[in-house]
Image (tube, helix red, strand yellow):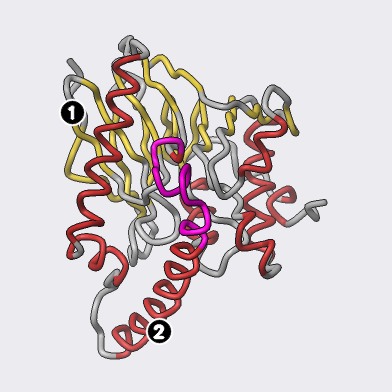
Amino acid sequence: MVRQGHEDDHDDDKGGGKRYRAVFISDLHLGTPGCRAEDLLDFLRASSSEHLYLVGDIIDGWQLRRRWYWPQAHNDVVQKLLRRARKGCRVVFVPGNHDEFARGFIGHQFGGIEVVDDAVHLTADGKRLWVTHGDYFDGVIQCAKWLAYVGDNLYEFTLKLNRYLNHLRAKFGLPYWSLSAYLKHKVKKAVNFISDFEQAVAHEAKKRGHQGVVCGHIHHAEIREIEGILYCNDGDWVESLTALVEHHDGRLELVRWGEAAPAQALQTASVRAATA
């Protein structure tokens, strides 16, 4: 059972902040040292929405089975999400591969949070967006799960090394630098995997008759058009600290939480979806 944290003691959901029609976040990986829970809490406190989609890998069951890690900030994130649902925001949870245990509860609600296999979001300007985590389009997950576990351990090691390197960089006044992102973009197979994944997800959305798709899974935030389909990946809250947001006119935007802004201002990505 999640212990009630201090999030429930403060009525910080009233007024103020950035107001959106919908917010999509995924790959929080609560239960791991890599989760940037405090940054996520800052983002949630600085924004509000009518719809909030949790697009998978919210809780990292894989890592929790190996080693229990659950600090207070992770409790606070859960309490914040439950509070959003109580305050009238529609909160929809689409489980991913790391929290696949929740797929056994599809069709149920917990504290007002709906658990669904996938969802369809209708934007203010009439676009039908298919919402899915995306692991069904990952051949490694589907065909060689043991290899996915190995990759997960290697990723955790990379994150630990990354934290050590950035601690040293900070001492020398150097900005944050992502080792894992660097490796992904330098290794040809990783680049090809991302491209193949995006193509496969967009193709399935088109086959289902949707105008766009929102997914997570690969920790690579992006908005672009693929074969006439609006492909949106909301990134992660381990490194990129990104969310996909819908404005009240239907415009979609990728928001990146500021790394060092004193007032924790929202910094928006340069790419925006066309509102055609």
Q: Which of the 4 image quadrants contains residue 30?
A: bottom right
Relative image position of residue 223 (x, y in whole percent): 24, 36
Asked if labels 2 and 1 touch by Cβ distance under 8 angstroms, the answer is no
First in residue order: circle 1 vs circle 2 = 2
Residue 2 is a magenta residue: no
Relative image position of residue 193 (x, y in whole percent): 27, 48
Q: Is residue 179 above or below residue 24?
A: below
Q: Mark number for residue 140?
A: none
Front residue of 8/38: it is 38
Q: Is residue 166 above or below residue 34?
A: below
Residue drawn at (30%, 46%) of the image: 221
Magenta: main secondary structure: helix
Q: Mark number for residue 164?
A: 2
Task: Left or right? Give the position of 34 relative to 114.
Answer: left
Q: Which of the 4 image quadrants contains residue 128?
A: top left
Q: Which residues are magenta?
A: 136-149
The amino acid beneath tag 1 is: Glu
Residue drawn at (69%, 22%) of the image: 107
The amino acid beneath tag 2 is: Tyr
Q: Secondary structure at mark 1?
A: strand
Residue corresponding to mark 1 = 225
Front residue of 100/243: it is 100
In the rendered view of the protein, which quadrant contains the C terminus? top left
Q: Residues within 10 Å of mark 1 (few under 14, many from 20)?
A: some
Q: CA distance from mark 1 to mark 2?
A: 37 Å
